[in-house]
Amino acid sequence: MDQVVKLASKAAVVIFSKSSCSMCHAIKRLFYGQGVSPIIHELDEEPRGREMEWALKRLGCNPSVPAVFIGGKFVGSADTVLTLQLSGELKKQLIEAGALWL
């Protein structure tokens, strides 16, 4: 759990993902499309990926990926991120975290 929290606080936007996950790919494209360069941790390529996946589940991320952190805080998985995008709140959070400039 500590490793996930530590990694999540290293950048304005951090996404825990799996390289074979289509929803993870869609969420990454959403951020890239807005001009945000998130730090991506592909759990299926990380030596301790399985442990990190369990930690994400304990944080309440179900399914465990994609797990999005903005400003070091757990935002949620794909459904939450898409809801924030549709409401306009995602952009506000990205600006507040310093991931996006106007």
Image: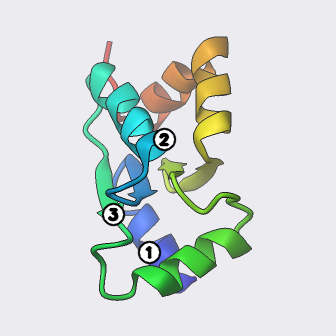
Residue named by callout 3: 41
Residue named by callout 2: 23
- Structural crowding at the residue carrying mark 3, measured as other residues with C-alpha within 10 Å and reported as few (<14), some (14–19) or many (≥20): many
Q: Position of residue 98 (x, y in %)?
A: 37, 35
The residue under label 3 is which amino acid type?
His
Do residues under tags 2 and 3 come within 8 Å of each other at their CB atoms? no
Label 2: which secondary element: helix
- Name the quadrant containing residue 67: bottom right
The residue under label 2 is which amino acid type?
Met
Q: Position of residue 16 (x, y in %)?
A: 43, 59
User: In terms of depth relative to the viewer, which is nearer, 20 or 102?
Assistant: 20
As drawn, is 102 to the left or to the right of 86?
Answer: left
| 2 or 3: tag closer to the N-terminus | 2
Q: Position of residue 19 (x, y in %)?
A: 32, 57
* Camera-nearest label, 1 or 3: 3
Residue named by callout 1: 6
Q: Is residue 90 visible?
A: yes
User: Cα distance, mark 2 to mark 1?
Assistant: 24 Å
Label 1: which secondary element: helix
Residue 45 versus residue 48 in the image, above or below: above
- Structural crowding at the residue carrying mark 2, measured as other residues with C-alpha within 10 Å and reported as few (<14), some (14–19) or many (≥20): some
Q: Quadrant of the N terminus?
A: bottom right
Q: Quadrant of the C terminus?
A: top left
- Structural crowding at the residue carrying mark 1, measured as other residues with C-alpha within 10 Å and reported as few (<14), some (14–19) or many (≥20): few
